[in-house]
Amino acid sequence: MPAPTPELPYKIAVLCYLFDEEGRVLMLHRRKPPNRDLYSPVGGKLEQGVGESPTACAVREIQEEVDLTVAEGDLHLTGMVSESGYENQTHWLMFLYEVTRPVKVERMSFDEGTLEWFTRDELDALPLPESDRKVLWPQFWAHRGRFFAGHIACEGPEMVWRLEQSF
């Protein structure tokens, strides 16, 4: 049995999966932590102080990072993943949203990094966070249009994860 998780702050974030007409996914090559120099979907932290909902956070992050306006109705909640003991500094609760319509993106660079389009097969060659490569992407593809919930434990020498719900 793993050691008890230390009392660490929780951070809540969204990851947003956007696709173009060709079925390519938009990725951010990050210039800032977390995951500096790695690729991830666009997204960011929920503004807890103002009571922002995860869906409103996704709409806001897409507007801020991609300069694209989407409606709440354009989003599908594909997954919810908790992550304990990330870098022994924090716990995360992440909501994974897919934009359900193809999008066009004009701005491809901003202060947090560079936006780039990739096919599903090209993702395998990208430098991705370990949790994205081993958990988030496989579960996103398996549950696209549906829903899953999972937990990733980062406290030990190896990341351990489990699927908690799958619909």
Image (cartoon, rainbow, N blue to C red):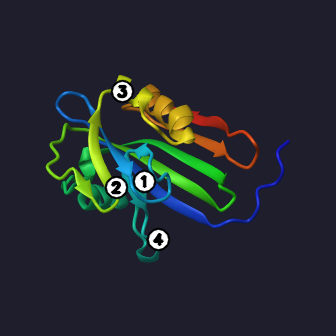
Q: Distance between the residues labelled 4 and 1?
A: 13 Å
Q: What element carries label 2?
A: helix
Location of mark 1 (residue): 14
Residue at left offset 59%, top offset 40%: 150
Q: Is residue 51 above or below residue 154?
A: below
Residue at left offset 41%, top offset 76%: 50
Q: Is mark 4 on a helix, strand or loop?
A: helix
Q: In this view, does 105 lie to the left or right of 129?
A: left
Q: What residue type is labelled 2?
A: Ala
Whether pointer 1 and pointer 2 mark residues with C-beta atoms closer than 8 Å, the reply is yes
Local crowd size for mark 4, using a 10 Å CA cut-off: few (<14), some (14–19), many (≥20) = few
Location of mark 2 (residue): 58
Q: Position of residue 51 (x, y in %)?
A: 43, 72
Residue 76 found in image quarter: top left
Q: What element carries label 3?
A: helix
Q: Earlier in the sequence, mark 4 or mark 1?
A: 1
Q: Which mark is residue 48?
A: 4
In this view, the residue farthest toward the bottom is: 49
Q: How far apart are marks 4 and 3 (CA)?
A: 35 Å
Q: Is residue 4 visible?
A: yes
Q: How far apart are marks 1 and 3 (CA)?
A: 23 Å
Q: Is residue 52 above or below residue 116?
A: below
Q: Which of marks 4 and 2 is nearer the N terminus?
A: 4
Q: Which amino acid does label 3 sit on?
A: Glu
